[in-house]
Amino acid sequence: MRQSLTETAEARLLRQSLTAAEQALWTALRNRQFLGLKFRGQAPIGAKIVDFLCLERRLVVQVDSGLGPHDTAWFAAEGFRALHLPPDAILSNLPGCLQHLAEELSR
């Protein structure tokens, strides 16, 4: 799953301009702090750039952009499960969102 230089550059730019919700979630996920799993932030998958990615568990986490049925089907075809965590939920109840994420990862 090689990425083009354009996709990699775009992902790099997105990492530098995280929203408040993305920053809060990234702080909890980075450096294997969450369940010992490695997450990537603003990671390219094919032609898409996802907010967070856990390759080990094949899970995509989207924050700002919702997941439509087409997106979910596309990720499934690529072998990934997709989870949407709304930004307002992250900012108001990060522990609850992390619990929901932990439950999804244990499937």
Image (cartoon, rainbow, N blue to C red):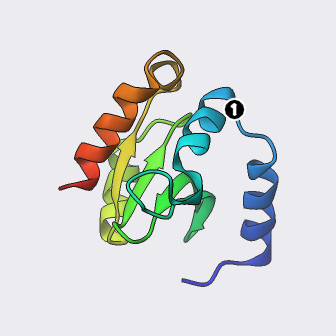
Residue placed furthest toward the top: 92
Give 84 or 47, whichever is nearer the viewer: 84
Q: Amino acid at mark 1?
A: Thr
Give 33 or 68, whichever is nearer the viewer: 33
Q: Quadrant of the C terminus?
A: bottom left
The residue identified by callout 1 is 19
Q: Residue at x 67, y 27 (%)?
A: 20
Q: Position of residue 28 (x, y in %)?
A: 53, 42
- Residue 26, placed above or below residue 36: above
Count every numbered label the image shows and give the total.
1
Q: Residue at x 74, y 51 (%)?
A: 15
9 sits left or right of 62 in the view? right
Q: Position of residue 3 (x, y in %)?
A: 66, 78
Q: Residue at x 55, y 38 (%)?
A: 25
Q: Residue at x 66, y 37 (%)?
A: 23
Residue placed furthest toward the left: 107
- Residue 56, placed above or below residue 21: below
Give 28 or 54, whichever is nearer the viewer: 28
Local SS, label 1 = loop
> To which quarter of the image does residue 77 belong?
bottom left
> To which quarter of the image does residue 95 belong?
top left
Give 37 or 78, whichever is nearer the viewer: 37
Q: Position of residue 55 (x, y in %)?
A: 44, 70
